[in-house]
Image (cartoon, grey):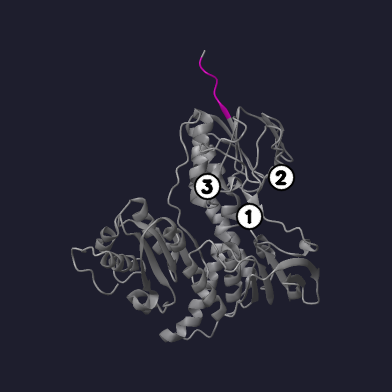
Amino acid sequence: MGQAMTSVIVIGAGPAGVMAALRAAELGAETTLVTSGEFGGMAANDGPVPVRTLAHAARLLRGIRQSEQYGLTTGGAAIDYPRLLSRVSDVVREVRMHSTLRQEVERLGVSVHERTGPARFIDSHTVETDHGPRLQADRFIIATGGVSRQLAVPGFELTSTHSDAWALTSVPPSMLVIGGGATGAQLASVFNAFGTRIDLFQSGPRIIPLEDEDVSAAVAAAFRKAGISIHESFGVIESFEKSAVGVRMNYSRNGEHLSAEAALAVVATGWVANTSGLNLAEPGVAVDDRGFVRVDPYLQTTAPHVHAAGDVIGHMMLVPQALQGGFVAATNAVRGPTLPLQDAVGPTGGFTDPDYAQVGLTEAKARESHDIVVSVVPFDSTTRTIIDGHTVGFCKLIVDRATCRILGCHVVGEGAVEIVQGAAIAIAAGMRVDDLARVPLSFPTYTGILALVAAGAARDLGLMVNWQAPTVQ
């Protein structure tokens, strides 16, 4: 008798879940993929894809406004929001349709149950859903993603999340954005471009607090110049209430009672694990004090037959990391603990105006454990940025003095997210900074700034760059 085939149920069809299902099927497991909503999860249907599409529209608007400098008369631009949203849904549908992952899932014989409503464990090897079959398996992979954090304040039900932007029929005249992390900053920037009056509230001392301090400062300065009101360390929210305008937020700071109102209040104060209703106590899966599923380096939960990956484990909550996690979780679910999750280089960024991005360590973090050299090239001194009229921003490289290896790269400005990908490759390859300075990157390009900033660091380190790098890039 041959060994019975392992059966695996993957709960959630975002990047982590889809990759987990593909990998499990590829390893010969009988695989079922269950998702409460649409294939592709938040990433395709509600997160990066729609937000990036709105950000592209905002960019086109800014391009129209800039075009007069280039002798182009356009007669201005008006925004037709319902039409923009129909473009967003076309993009989402097209991305989903062309997902090669979907075709692979079908080719490998994974059985897919979409739009089932939330899944829950009814015993340690059985799950049921509202609109799908009851399913049993030997192994489970939880990839249910995250949801916006709810605030325990009176009137919270009057607020919106970033997802509600897709339900608006017109651009709101005013908006309170509560939370100045990546999501809040992108919403504030996009709707400001569309003509909404924005008040951005951040509980801590700076917006986009996970970025390098110079990046936070540059983005905040650009936001203010664009007319966004930023309220850092704003205090404590007491309640939300209906007002003549829309919603009023009552808050207090140092004993002083304050309020702000707008047509819409969008709360973007973080992302928490989407595990409520899964009934994780049934299989014995523990969560940490923030509600994220606890996993070991093999992405195994406290229940040996259950693994987890993606936003639900609360590591770097990004698409590439979710794909990697799904692969690792499924490999170990089918083969046993053979493949530990490696800490990979993870570039991050925001499609705001200006864009910002980072990879590796911030300057403050690098200084804690390294003797460093910092090289900065401002955007107003490089050829391509001057040609395109995008001279706001800078590229900063952080290098270890002892090894000459690149520890971090931080960029604010046009093309920041693309520039940082080049730095990520250099870091992942373990390149020395003088090696990067020698790469003859195309001229005039945005990415070319990396050769300049690397040459600057190499000079500070007293390294010879064998050929004379061009002084402009």
Q: Is residue 48 magenta?
A: no
What's the residue at 50%, 31% (across, down)?
A: 337
What's the residue at 46%, 31% (across, down)?
A: 338
Q: Quadrant of the C terminus?
A: bottom left
Does any portion of residue 189 appear in the rendered image?
yes
Query: Where residue 204 sits: x, y (%)?
Result: 61, 66
Q: Secondary structure at mark 3?
A: helix
Which region is colored magenta? 2-7
Q: Which residue is mark 2?
A: 276
Quick one: label 1 or label 3, which is nearer the N terminus? Answer: 1
Q: Is residue 312 above or below residue 154?
A: above
Q: Spatial distance from mark 2 to mark 3, Cα to Cα?
A: 20 Å
Q: Mark 1, mark 3: which one is toward the viewer?
A: 1
Q: Which residue is mark 3?
A: 322
Q: Which residue is mark 1?
A: 271
What kind of secondary structure does the magenta stretch mostly adopt?
loop
The amino acid sitting under disc 2 is Ser
Quadrant of the rendered structure where residue 433 is?
Answer: bottom left
Q: Secondary structure at mark 1?
A: strand
Tell me: 118 left or right of 422.
Answer: right
